[in-house]
Image (cartoon, rainbow, N blue to C red):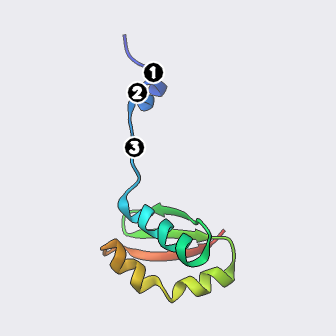
Amino acid sequence: MTDSLADILGRQRYEAPDEISIIKQFIQEQFQLTPQVSIKQSQIIIIVPNSALAGSLRMYLHELKELCKTDKRLVIRIG
């Protein structure tokens, strides 16, 4: 018999990419807030709760990109 989709996915263990943990840790240390982070094909999206944090974080984008060792574009969104 075939397994249901829930059974198949339940056996899989997915680990978040290193970039996500690096970004979350950096923002937690700097701003005492844990953002939502998602990765697309050519960009990493960082979702923060307000525009003040987004503006402050913009100054650190170059440093974050170097820490992540990625060529993907870092995008800040307010959510």
Residue designated by label 3: 14
Q: Amino acid at mark 1?
A: Ser
Query: Which quadrant is the C terminus positioned in?
Result: bottom right
Q: Amino acid at mark 3?
A: Tyr
In front: 28, or 70?
28
* Spot occupied by residue 72 in the image (x, y as percentages of width and height): 35, 73
| Tag nearer the camera, 3 or 2 | 3
Q: Using residue 76 as the reference point, say whether residue 17 is left or right of it.
A: left
Q: Which mark is residue 51?
A: none
For residue 58, above or below residue 11: below
Disc 3 and disc 2 in contact, CB within 8 angstroms: no
Kind of residue at disc 2: Ile
Q: Mark 1 or 3 closer to N-term?
A: 1
The residues bearing labels 3 and 2 have C-alpha atoms spaced at a distance of: 13 Å
Query: What is the CA distance from the residue labelled 2 to the residue labelled 1?
Result: 6 Å
Q: Which residue is mark 2?
A: 8
Q: How many marks?
A: 3
**Mark 1, residue position:** 4
Q: Which percent across, then down, holds residue 7?
A: 45, 24
Q: Left or right? Give the position of 52 relative to 26.
A: right
- x, y percent for residue 24: 50, 66
Furthest-top residue in this view: 1
Residue at 68% across, 84% down: 52
SS type, badge 3:
loop
Circle 2 packing at 10 Å, graded few (<14), some (14-19), many (20+), is few
